Amino acid sequence: MRQIAPSARYTENMEWACPENDLLIIGLSDFGQKAAGTINFIELPKVSDHFEKDAIFAVTESDKMANEIYLPVAGTIVEVNTVLLDEPTLINQEPYDRGWIVKIKPDDKDDFLELMSAAAFEEYIGAFFRRDNS
């Protein structure tokens, strides 16, 4: 399983976004799904729902916690991965492939460029594992 999707961009809330033509595919990062635990339920939005940037668009429940998932850019939902309703653990097993959550038409496709690159995200999550040696 890939830990990072190099073409994706990331948020501090652990979501990823990856361009597909004029759309963005949105999901929960590998690091985010590991922190959440085994996901056993997801509440999904509806096609045509519109969300502002950083709005909660989905909620997962796992063996550890409930987890709110935030939309990294403003946009309209054009496709929902309904397979997750029956197989929510796909988010754990294949977060960048079959575990994607929604596809959106972004209000402004340039907002994608404001998200963290894969390298910046790796640096960001690496901070969770560093110890202060002072």
Image (spheres, grey):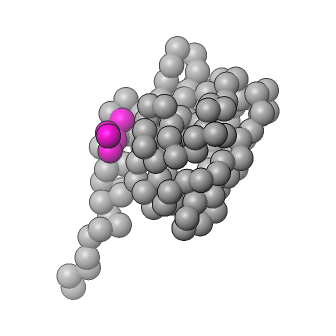
Residue at the bottom extreme? Answer: 134
Q: Magenta span has 128?
A: no
Residue 75 found in image quarter? top right
| Spot occupied by residue 17 in the image (x, y as percentages of width and height) | 50, 35
Q: Position of residue 14 (x, y in %)?
A: 49, 51
Most distant residue in the front direction: 86
Tell me the residue at 30%/60% (across/down).
126
Nearer to me, 20 or 45: 45
In what quadrant of the picture does the N terminus appear? top left
Instruction: Note whether residue 119 is visible.
Output: yes
Q: Residue furthest left?
A: 133
Q: Measured from the top left, where is residue 18 in percent x and y? A: 47, 29
Residue 97 lies, in percent from the top left, at 44, 31
Q: Nearer the viewer, residue 26 or 105?
A: 26
- Left or right: 122 in relation to 65: left
In the rendered structure, the answer to whether residue 23 lies left or right of residue 49 reads: left
Relative height, residue 55 to residue 130 (above, below): above
60, above or below 48, in the image: below
Residue at x 74%, y 38% (from the top left corner):
45
Residue shown at the point (32%, 44%) measured from the top left: 3
Q: Quadrant of the C terminus?
A: bottom left
- Number of callouts in the render? 0
**Is residue 3 part of the magenta span, yes or no?**
yes
Q: Residue lying farthest top? A: 21
Q: Main secondary structure of the magenta part?
A: loop
Boundaries of the magenta span: 1-5
Q: Is residue 106 left or right of residue 35?
A: right
User: 120 or 58: which is nearer to us?
Assistant: 58
Q: Can residue 55 be seen by looking at this rendering?
A: no
Q: Residue at the location (37% across, 39% down)?
A: 117
